[in-house]
Image (spheres, helix red, strand yellow):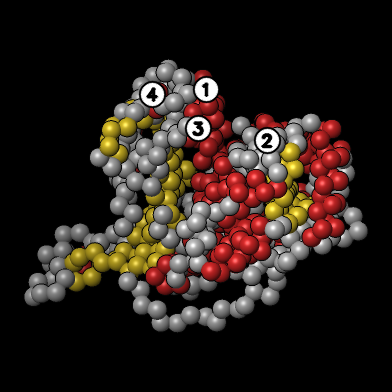
Amino acid sequence: MVQKLETAATPQHNRTADPCVVVIFGASGDLTKRKLIPAILNLQNGGFLPKNLAVVGVARTKMSHAEFRDEVKPDDKVISAAPMRAAWASLSERVFYFAADATKSESFPGIGEFLKKTDSQVGTPGNYLFYLSVAPTLVAPIVQNLGKCGLAKEENGRWRRVVIEKPFGHDLPSAVELNRTIKAVIGEKQIFRIDHYLGKETVQNLMVFRFGNGMFEPIWNRNYIDHVQITVSEELGVEGRGPYYDTAGAMRDMVPNHIAQLVSLVGMEPPISFSADAVRDEQVKLLKSIEPLTPEEVLQQAVRGQYGPGDVDGKKVPGYREEEKVPPESNTETFVALRLLVDNWRWAGVPFYARTGKRLPKRMTQIVIQFKHAPAMLFQHTSVDRLTTNRLYIHIQPKEGISLRFGAKVPGPVLTMGAVEMDFDYVDYFGKVPSTGYETLLYDAMIGDATLFQRADMVEAGWSMVQPVLDVWKALPARSFPNYAAGSWGPPEADELLRRDGRHWENSGT
């Protein structure tokens, strides 16, 4: 355990979010109750929201304000403490509902009038944050409707922003077209393409860790790092999302967004500042530096899999093709592993291995930085037969923290070496803070800080990274599915991907 020795003075936040109305399209969906309202409540409890802030849910279901408040009210255990009960009592008075079909332009004059009424009632000055918690196919029509009725127009100091959930497009051409369609209505500075992974403290800490520590910044390159591993594994299956997942698959669902973000934050050059565009400029440069795979390389450096029946936590679970609403002959991948090379000076010759999958042994998101071995000649006449591999583990979920593995002498008269770890855990060090992962992102959207949101060129760079693989997989459908058992670490080809390079996956999570 890392001992808490010194903590820099924590500045008090000196800015509450801008007074605004948060308008949630698709408010009757699961995301609103599970993530968005709890995140807004946590911000309220933390003192980050002004009194003149309102939430308006918009969906087709007929509901009264009171019924909507009951629908999205957090569980009793969440608001059991007095401060949280008080926060909900205050916030709930400013939670409203408007029944409308946002895909129809005739709905929007009514929405606009209701927002004006809300401005008058709550004291908001006409700032609107539109959160599109809707199916991907509805994003463009809703933005176009916002434009047609004038709700997207910024004037007289009032801002209008649109938060868009992933997936942003289905492939590179559709992402380019979606960007073109949306930017014909609103400017890039009004668009906040959200990736909830970037709300994780450890992900945000990557830049501080890399660029704020003199012991790591100088060695973060090909001279000292052997390779990088990124794992995003899930124990769960598709959990009733069969219709969506079967059209997306693991590649589209996770790689151009979540994994591309992690690759870019690990590999980017130091930005000139922490301003949104400075950071995102460097992320885009890194993603554009990834060598595109040729069709021949796809067959060797990209692995796909689909889970069959198996055991997870001692329980029998069905294969993907037996899941609810999944076609019995589906060829959709539920597992992806890639070997990526970055064609720049810092990372030349250093492979980035990335994998993601469902029905794996544990829920784990982590980045492993493996350093090169020290020269072994000093130990050739000792009982040390091999040196400990130095690894840096960046844990993102479910545990958030950082661990460093290194070698130390085992006590005793004979020179032997053992692996030891220094472990930093966010909860142990800073205490547990109620979080859904959306708090920082929503707060940043309210104050207009786009650092943690994807820019149009970032989205397109992420799709460019995977498009060659999608093209080959479309031309050559998988013939071996299912090729890994639920509860295993994926198909054997994923292990072979590293074994060919003399390496292996780190599965422990430490």
In primary-sequence order, the first of circles 4 and 1 is 4
In primary-sequence order, the first of circles 4 and 2 is 2
**Residue kind at label 3, given as amino acid type:** Arg
**Crowding near pointer 2: few (<14 within 10 Å), some, many (20+)?**
few
Residue under pointer 2 = 61
Residue 102 against residue 122 in the figure, above or below: above
Mark 4–mark 2 Cα distance, whole angstroms, equals 32 Å
Q: What percent of the width, then of the height, locates residue 233?
A: 40, 44
The label number, if any, that marks residue 474 in the structure image = 1
The label number, if any, that marks residue 322 in the structure image = 4
Instruction: Quadrant for the C terminus, please.
Output: bottom left
**Residue kind at label 4, given as amino acid type:** Glu
Residue 445 against residue 477 in the figure, above or below: below
Mark 3–mark 2 Cα distance, whole angstroms, equals 21 Å
Residue under pointer 3 = 241
**Crowding near pointer 4: few (<14 within 10 Å), some, many (20+)?**
some
Quadrant of residue 328 within the rendered picture = top left
Circle nearer the viewer, 4 or 1: 4
